Image (cartoon, rainbow, N blue to C red):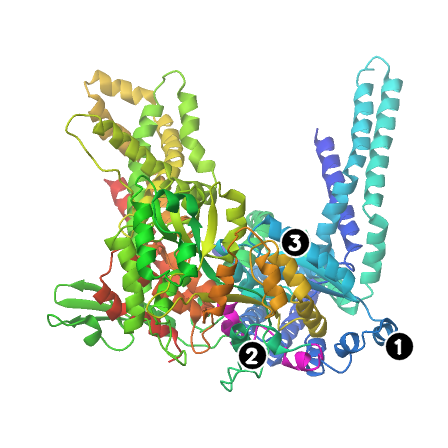
Amino acid sequence: MQRMQRRFSWISLIAILTLALAACGGGTTAQPTTAPAPTEAAAATEAPAATEAPAPTEAPAPTEAAAATEAPVAMDEVALRWRTRPDNQAEIDVYSQISSELDAQLDNISLTYEPGGSETSSYQDVLKTELSAGTAPDVFWIPGTDIADFATRGLILDLRDLADADADYNDGDFYPGPMFHLTFNPETGMTGETLWGLPRDVSTFALYINNDLIEQAGAEDPRVLAANGEWTWDKFLETAVAVNNLGGDVKGFGMNAWWANPGLFINSAGGGFFNEDRTACALDSDASVAGMEFASRLYNEFGVAVPYGEDSEPPFLAGNVGMFLNGRWATPGTRASAAFDWDVVDVPIGPGGARSWLFWGAYVVNANTAHPEAAWQLVRALTTAETQSKIAELGANIPSRVSDEAIQAFLTYTPPANNQAFINNLANDPAVEGPLWAGSWPEFDAATGSKFTALLNGDLTLEDYRATVCEEANQAFDQ
Amino acid sequence: MATTTARKPATTAGAALVIRLGAAWHALLAFGLVAATWALLQARWVQRDGLRLYVAGLILLAAVASVSALVLLLRRDRRGRAISLGLNYIFGVGSLLSLLGVLGLYISLDEVAASFNRWVWLLLGVLVGFLIGSVGDRFTHAPTTQAAFHRVGGWVMGASAIILLLAMGLIQGVIGLLSGLGDPLALVLLSATVLFGLFFWLMLRPQLAVAFGAGERDAEAVSGFLFIAPNLLGFMLFFAGPLLFSLYLSFTNSDSFTAEFVGLRNYIEIFSLQFAQVPPGQRSGAVLSSGYIELVRLGDFVIGAKDRIFWIALWNTIVYCFWVTMLSVVPALLVATVLNSKIPGMQFFRAIYFIPSIAGVVGVAVIWKWLYNSNIGFLNYGINQVLGLFNRLPFVEIAPVQISWLASQQTALASIILMAAWQLLGFNTILFLAGLQGIPGEIYEAATIDGASNLQRFRYMTLPLLAPTTFFVVTTTLITTLQVFSEPFVMTPPPGGGPNNSTMTAVLYLYQRGFNRFEQGYAAAVAWVVFLFIFAVTLVQFRIQRRYGDM
């Protein structure tokens, strides 16, 4: 018995050692792409344009390009990892497909696509942790609100020099709102001086409507009202009350609990989150408070809304909510799950107009990438009209390029039939989702979020809300 | 005692040489470590000051230990041998692990795993060989045939294993290893591994033990330490190390990328409170200093805090801890008492009660989140169905309810408490059940003969005899609940901790400060305050338990 045990121990030891030996053979193939070699990276960033970047773009003729890239020293293929935050498997599939196509299309660049987690699985938190550990991908997507935080901490690369050397690139090809922040220089306070990334897409809010419930309630068709310019807060409230009066589990209106939803009412009342130079909280201004007063009445006075803090999407998809405020990203889910007649309509007109949001996020380049030029090429390739149209076709977002062609193509991606509502909301002076260059957005978001919730759930009076909403929020700004 | 220290152990010439060599080795090691500390402090490539200081401190500590070993070895002090063994072991293992890293072993493990998956079917050959050998066992009457089967079986097994290893890249591995050893760093690490290993082995030799007068107990201690060394190293590397590093971070303003020493500033901000009197009709903002926000108002008095959310989170954690402990311990004791009875089918019920404990917290939380949904959740649906039954009675008309379980600040924390208590109940029940089954039945029989009622037996016998189990259950439940994170994180998603911070807990708060806002230094300080709080609670419990046990 003892002999057998000893023999078994020896066999196990030999097996482990030989497996370890086998492992020694593969070490050369799996090198990290964000090699932290500081000298290499520094050299590459200091002299970005001279050698690699311009060659493929400025000399599109195949023979010349080949000569430029394959010249005297054989250039090794550059491996890049990139990541974005897809909302569902269909998007993951499309991004994976795009990655494969670009892999074949981009000379000497090998791509690995990593789908990031969803918002609820803390995409940004994971990314920040990876950046801290030095294992983040070369190119990644971040929401517009995070640009300042990442840029001022030096986590993302200023691509301005690379862009200037790229003859085909023009800031004006993209919506100006996102580009204002993407080209903002925090050192000088001027815009147009830097380039922190390129917008992946844009989006905006619209009201997803359950036509069956609205018709059953005998309310006027919001689309007709919107077309006639009569889709006001009063009409919106009337519709919500009428649907709510159907009784049972049916609610007139629903929106989810994050900053943009109450923000829509603040914007449409003529208010805003920040003062003009975005250095202080402006949620206690008369206009901002008026917006929140209206929102609060929906919940507390008329009781027509799904309780704030509850996810309104499932009851809407279950056919229990008349109007659901959400962005373009809710379209694929609605297409897949709604078993009723649905469409979208413009956001209602408040005292300050019908001001929706312009949401955006951008592809940015890891400041520690070993291959800035290749990363820039990838960012450019990911934001071409062709690539964006493939994503937009899924229905989750709107191309970030300002072009009639892109808009016309977007209008054909139905349902919803009334895609024009999104375009109207984009054209109607939307408030741009923007980072806080003079403060901490996560801190501001956390401080104000709890106040919105307290007010909309009736735990805080409007007077107390006005008196306290900016108290904690102002601590988010640089002192 | 005096005799053992007075008698000088006999030292052979060989042992004396090893001791001198060992001392020289430790002198060299100390010099190298001091030089490494200096180089690290000068290094510009390590951008993180905090990490650099921390590592430099550890290296310097090792240098001091090496010098101590040198001095004590020369004095023939047993402690010198012990320190030498420890240092050589730690550095030997460290060098070996680093060598494997340089040779690319770790980053290739995935490939080996993938390759194994590809070629695993070759293990069928091993199985065939085993079966051939097993067939041979049947020929007990023909030893030659039996031996032949065993031999052939062994060959088939061995050949299959070798083919598998070759297919997995053994030859490429050997080539990779040999070419990897061409790297100067790999050679240095290999030399270090060999040298540390050699001195460890030399110090372990019986002659050395005799030279230092080490007895049976020392030998046992060395063996004991060697057995626990892998675990101890893991503990030091992955638990104690980061723990100490977090303590250092708590005195900095680290944002994960840079760190400046700020002393006690983080702790001061956490504990900054201000008490003030508020004249009637005035808001607290008018009387509190700048930076302070109203935490709680008691009549005309207001307490302001610089970090209001920390106190809210701490309070929520205490409330959560209290209620979850109450609701998962007391009912667990009652359920365990019932499940302890010898009724047919009780095993089934024991399993049923235990099931929630083995389910993942996140999965359970997601399911409960749906149950709690005010519009389409089963909980409100069930309540309304019951109300519907009442409404069938004459003159009764109760309106349907739509409770916002997770959306209202009045009910959100209570909803999470309910779910957590439900999940912990089963585990605590099993612990109590084990405790109950450890109580001898004779005691109950004697009490019954003495005329004790069921209640008296439970009060005066079961409860005192279950005291150690109860202490364990309460302590583990308290510690678990004071660290609550997943439940509020999943059920009341960010930003913030639920409606108006009503489900913000201490650990969730430190996570948000550390990973959401990049304030790792401040988050580390919060973590240490929470740790001290949990430690204090446990200590108080120990005291109470001791007093209770003495009575």
Within 10 Å of disc 1 (Cα), the crowding (few <14, some 14-19, many 20+) is: few
Q: Which residue is mark 2?
A: A183
Q: Residue furthest front?
A: A228
Q: In which quarter of the view is residue B202 placed?
A: bottom right
Q: Position of residue A377 (x, y in %)?
A: 71, 71
At 26% from the left edge and 52% from the top edge, which residue is drawn? A302
Residue B205 on image: x %, y %: 68, 53
- In the image, is residue B179 above or below residue B318? below
> Residue B54, percent across and down?
53, 70
Left or right? Give the position of B490 relative to B387: right
First along the sequence among labels 2 and 3: 3
Label 2 neighbour load within 10 Å: few <14, some 14-19, many 20+: many
The kind of secondary structure element at disc 2 is loop
Q: Secondary structure at mark 1?
A: loop
- How far is disc 3 from disc 1 in space, using C-alphas? 38 Å
Q: Amino acid at mark 3?
A: Val
Asked whether B342 or B199 is in front, the reply is B342
Q: Foreground: A163 or A296? A: A296
Looking at the rendered structure, whether the residues under marks 2 and 1 are on a common chain is answered as: yes
- Tell me whether circle 2 and circle 3 mark residues in contact (CB < 8 Å): no
Q: Which mark is residue A94?
A: 3
Which residue matches tag 1?
Answer: A72
Image quadrant in which the C terminus of chain B is located: top left
| Subunit under mark 2 | A
Tell me the kind of residue under disc 1. Answer: Pro
Region in magenta: A143-168
Q: Of the two numbered discs 2 and 1 on the same chain, state the one appearing first in sequence.
A: 1
The answer to which of marks 3 and 1 sits earlier in the sequence is 1
**Disc nearest the viewer among 2 and 1:** 2
